[in-house]
Image (spheres, grey):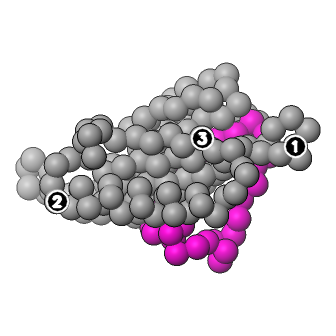
């Protein structure tokens, strides 16, 4: 299993680098991907034998440049997972309230990676927590962690791996 912070998956060279890694599972933070970029990554991933577990896509926002002009950008953040094996995924209609909180944050992706003969699996979760010391960042971390641990209670007797990423506040 490999974890990486990609900064963006839009560039084909970044996609080629990620999809060329030799791992069974790849968890990616900060893909900065809108729906179009995720569709492109999905096609590239399938062509190279990967199965994609998406986090919620971003929508472009307007940002002011140094010269005062506005430009459409994809905000920082996001999460996704890739597996070399066919993964299990539940439809959105079956998500619990805690899973919806995590999904709507655009900071979570999960995949059920098959083990051995495929009759058992391990959840590989990717939770990318907000960074910073502002009240909003601390509350965001707290809310996501509470929702994540509440969600995992509904996964009895299933092994889990959680990539928990935050760039600060490890003492919380």
CA distance for labels 2 and 3: 28 Å
Q: For mark 3, what is the residue?
A: 161
Tag 1 secondary structure:
loop
Stretch in magenta = 80-104
Residue at 51%, 63% in the rendered image: 150
CA distance for labels 1 and 3: 17 Å
Single out the residue that lies furthest toward the right. 117
Pointer 1 or 2: first along the chain: 1
| Apparent side of residue 121 relative to residue 56 in the rendered image (left or right) | right
| Apparent side of residue 68 relative to residue 146 in the rendered image (left or right) | left
Looking at the picture, how far across and down is residue 30, in whole percent?
Answer: 41, 44
Tag 3 secondary structure:
strand
87 in the magenta segment? yes
Looking at the picture, how far across and down is residue 36, in whole percent?
Answer: 53, 57
**Which image quadrant is residue 140 in?**
bottom left
Q: For mark 2, what is the residue?
A: 135
Q: Nearer the viewer, residue 93 or 13?
A: 93
Check residue 118 in the rendering and tell me which mark sits there, or answer none. Answer: 1
Tag 2 secondary structure:
helix
For the N terminus, give its image quadrant: top right
In the image, residue 68 sits, relative to residue 167, either above or below, namely below
Pointer 2 or 3: first along the chain: 2
78 in the magenta segment? no
Residue 29 is at least partly visible in this image: yes
């Amino acid at each position: 299993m490999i974890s990486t912070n990609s900064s963006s998956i839009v560039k084909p060279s970044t996609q080629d680098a990620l999809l060329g890694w030799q791992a069974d599972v790849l968890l990616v933070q900060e893909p900065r991907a809108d729906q179009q970029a995720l569709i492109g990554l999905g096609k590239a991933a399938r062509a190279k034998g990967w199965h994609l577990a998406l986090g919620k896509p971003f929508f472009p926002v307007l940002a002011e440049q140094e010269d005062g002009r506005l430009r459409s950008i994809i905000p920082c953040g996001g999460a996704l997972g890739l597996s070399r094996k066919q993964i299990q995924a539940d439809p959105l209609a079956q998500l619990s309230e805690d899973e919806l909180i995590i999904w709507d944050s655009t900071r979570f992706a999960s995949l059920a990676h098959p083990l051995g003969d495929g009759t058992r699996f391990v959840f590989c979760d990717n939770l990318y927590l907000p960074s910073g010391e502002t009240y909003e960042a601390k509350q965001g971390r707290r809310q996501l962690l509470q929702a994540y641990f509440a969600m995992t209670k509904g996964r009895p007797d299933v092994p889990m791996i959680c990539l928990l990423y935050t760039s600060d506040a490890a003492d919380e």
